[in-house]
Structures are given as structure tokens and as C-alpha cells.
Image (cartoon, grey):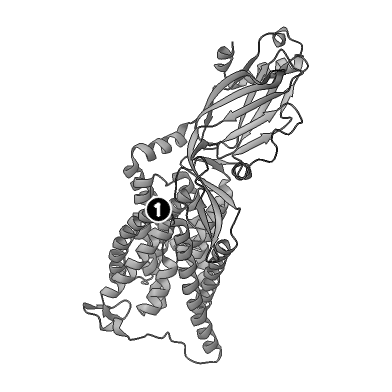
Amino acid sequence: MHKLLSSLPKSILALISAACLGLGGLAAAQGPDIAAVESEVSVGLFSGQTTVRVFGSTATPEVPIRLELTGPDRDVKFTRSVRRFGIKVAETITSAPTNIPSIRAELSSADIPLHQEGDELEQALIREGLVIIMPNAIKMEPTGLFFAEIPLPASAPVGDYKIEIFQEGALRDVAKIKLAEESFAIRQRGFVALVSRGAADYAFLYGLICVLVAVAAGWITERVFRNRR
Amino acid sequence: MSMYLPIAEMATNPFVIIFFGALVGAMSGLFGVGGGFLMAPILFFLGIPPSIAVSTEATQICAASVSGSLAHFRRGNLDIKMGGLLVAGGLIGSTIGVFTFKWLITLGSVDLVIQLFYVVFLGGVGGLMFLESLQAMLRRKAGKTVSLKRRHGFMHGLPFRTKFPRSKLYISAILPVTVGFGVGFLSAIMGVGGGFIMVPAMIYLLGMPTLVVVGTSLFTIIFVTANNTLQHAWFNGTVDLVLAGLLLLGGVIGAQIGVRLSGRFNAEQLRILLAIIVLAVCFKILMDLLIGGPAVQFSFGGGAGHA
């Protein structure tokens, strides 16, 4: 069922979500655990911050829901400032991971803190908005329907994203039960996609175009303003 | 309103970029420098990845320099012969600079080296320019004739002497080629046009008249930054055309404002103003080196961050 939901357009998904939450008490809420997200988020020239909507239902609404979003993996280098001869020098932390998700978000339906004091690497990522921690960000209805909006920063890279939804401690012996796993992609469209592909596939030509644009812009400006000085 | 930058893969406020582009463009028109040394820290502050910022600002500086040097050419304030020799040296220097940059990356100390380069050159050039201009201003106030000291040392005894009628000089061709080489090398390492080093070098080392210096400096910067843009786009894929467009829009407006403002100051006032800005940027980078930012930092994708 969730595959079918995933393929629906964003507007229809939002409508279904709003309708379900508004009406409440639908029989579907008592059925198997399901979740759905937009299948693709596209970014154009005037796109700003991206918001991803997730909704679903659970048979055990009394147990808090936790959602984890992970973006495409990227190579990373963590450095630590150390003082050498009076000046601060960045030294690579060799024990740190070298490949991590480019962005990560954790949302919860509960008001309990999702994390105790994170380690210093995690704190650095939180400071730059690449790890997003949002307690009480999942709206849970008594019927078991839930809904969440994940605000991704403007720097969220294109690629494939994964969303996993858990319930913690639903069973005595199991710490964490995965309710659902969904995926979506951030893709570029229109002029943005054209520039991106051009820069990657025809790098020399793209560079020449950049130089020509600069020379033309400078020349046109001088022509326009020549007689006004 | 926000605009998506395809290569930087992030959205940004276009008006903020246009505003800062105009600010730096105004400096270009005022002082005859590209303004890269100021634009780079501004773009980092706005959250643009360093490798994208450094590569893309070269495109803007190139456009501003085309506009500025054409204006100076029409006024007869451009020494094409001198500019050609500076360009020749500049292209050799920037190519060697690019390879040195790659070597520094393999050593893992590129960020520190760049910051130290900034401190040494901005501090040295800014300090010298400030003192010289201050002395000239004081002499002018005291009613004494103001003339730049032209030192006739071993440099003026070098071979391949040639006439530069526009600059009223008869010096060795090795001198401008060497200055161009140095500027091109530093341009590749520091990600700047190099005007802030070239302008004082032309005045104090080559002994060129201030009137010709600005146009000739901008002429040289066109070729150095065009070379940088092409190389960065070709080998690193770090030139963002949308960001460049926004910077260009602001830059061309600012450059015209700068040219108009430049008529309101005399040469010493302009030089002392530029010296203060150069020293302020130097102080900021020095403070970063001494005090530093957060203890733990990170960078994605292995892109070499600049100062």
C-alpha cells in the first residue's frame, strides 16, 4: 500500500494526510503500520528551503514514534584546532569517520530529548544544521495516524534520501522496532539541471561560456555607462 | 525570495549576493583592484563553500576588470605594452601556482599556508601603502611637492631594456614579467585577482605613474582571472554560473558607482583608504589564526578550503 502512496503526487499526499488527520478515527488507523513520503522533491532556480512531508499510521499510538532521515553519503574530513607556535592549526582527527550522511534529521512525537549530550563531532554537525534534532515534531492522533514535516536546509544536496520510522520500547524485550522505511530523491530541474549537467559533462565548454559571459557582461556595462560618466 | 545555486547545491538570498557584489564592484572602480581578497571572506561568511566561492569570484572580477579597463583604455590610461608583459608573466605564474596549490593539498597544509600568505602580503602591502600615502598627504598639507620615490637600484640595470612611452619609462622587460609572474602565482594560491599586490608593485617597483597603473592593472587581471575561471571550471568543476551571474549584476552596478566616487578623492586619499581596508582584512585573518573558530570543524568532499 505504501508503494502506491509513494507514487502519488505531493499535493494529493498532502490532501490525504490532512483529511486523515482532520477526520481522525478512520478504520485504516487500526490496520498495519504504514508510512508515505513524496517520491521526489525537485529543485529549480527559485527553490528555497525544502520541506518533506511524512505521514502514516500505527496500531500502537500510545508508544512514541521516532523518525530518522538520512541524506546521500559524502566524504568528510573532521579537524581539530590545535595551537602550534602560537597560531591555531587544523589537525585531522584520524579516529573520525571519513564518510557520513550529508544530512541527518531525527524527529520524535514525544517531548523526551532524543539525545543526551552528543559527542563533539555530532555537535559540530548540529551547529552547521547538518544534523537536525526535533523533539515533539511528529503530530500523533489518538487514532494512530501521524504526520511530520521535515525542514531540510538550503544546503541539502541532491541525491537519494532514506526515512526510517521506529517505535521505541513498544515491546519489553525489543528496544526499537522499525515500523516503515521509505525513500525519496532530491533532483534538479530546468535551468539548474542544465547548468549542473553542463558543468559536469562539458567542463571545458562550460568554463569557456563562463569566461565569455564575464567578458560580455563587462563589455555591455562599459557600453551602457560610457556616455553617462 | 531565494535562488538555488546549481554547483554549490544550496539556496541563497540573491539580493544579499547582489549587494556584496556591488560593494566589491565599487572598490574595483575606486581602486583598480579586483576585490577578490575581500569577496572571498564575505562569500565564506554567507555559507558558500570555499572552493566554489574562490572559483566563482574570479568570473566576477574578470567582468569588472573588462568594464574598468575599457573605460580606462578610452581615457588613454592603459599601457598595453606593459600590460602584455605583465599578462605573459601572470599566465606562467598562475599555472605554476595551480600545481603548487595541488602539491600543498597533498601535504595537507594548504589552509594554513594560504592564511599565512594573506597575513604576510596583506600586512606588508597595506602597511607600506599606508605609510607612503600618509607621508605624501602630510607633505601635500605642508605645501611641499608630492612625488613618488623612484628607486634606481640593480633592477634598473637589468638587460632587455625597452621603452614604455605611455608610462614614460625605459626599463628592463624582465621587471614587468617578474611582477606578473609573482601576481599570477599568488593569484592561483590565494584565489584573488592580485590587484592589491600589483597596484603597489607597479607604483613602487616599476615606477609607473598612478594614472596609468589602475587601467593597466585591470587589463592584466582580465587575463589572470579568465585563466583561473577556465581552469577551475575544467579541472575542479567549482564555478557556479548562477552565483557568478548574481555577483556580476552587483559588480557592474558597483563598479560604475566606484568610478564616479573616484573623482571625489585624490590619489593619496584613495591609496590610504585602500591601505586601511587591506589592513582590516589582514587583522581579521590574523585574529582567526590566533584565536580561531570552534575546536572541531569539518569539510565535505575534500574541497580545499581557502582562507
Residue B287: x percent and y percent? 58, 64
User: At 39% across and 74% down in the image, what residue appears?
Assistant: B201
Q: Is residue B160 left or right of residue B227?
A: left
A178 or A42, nearer to the observer? A178
How many badges with numbers are in the image?
Answer: 1
User: At 38% across and 68% down in the image, what residue appears?
Assistant: B217
B243 or B112, nearer to the observer? B112
Q: Is residue B209 visible?
A: no
Q: Relative to B241, does residue A60 appear above or below in the rendering?
A: above
Which image quadrant: the N terminus of chain A? top right
Q: Residue furthest front?
A: A173
Under circle 1, the secondary element is helix
User: At 76% across and 14% down in the image, what residue appears?
Assistant: A143
Residue annotated with mark 1: B105
Q: Is residue B113 left or right of residue A145?
A: left
What amino acid does circle 1 point to? Ile
Residue A69 picture quarter: top right
Residue B279: x percent and y percent? 54, 70
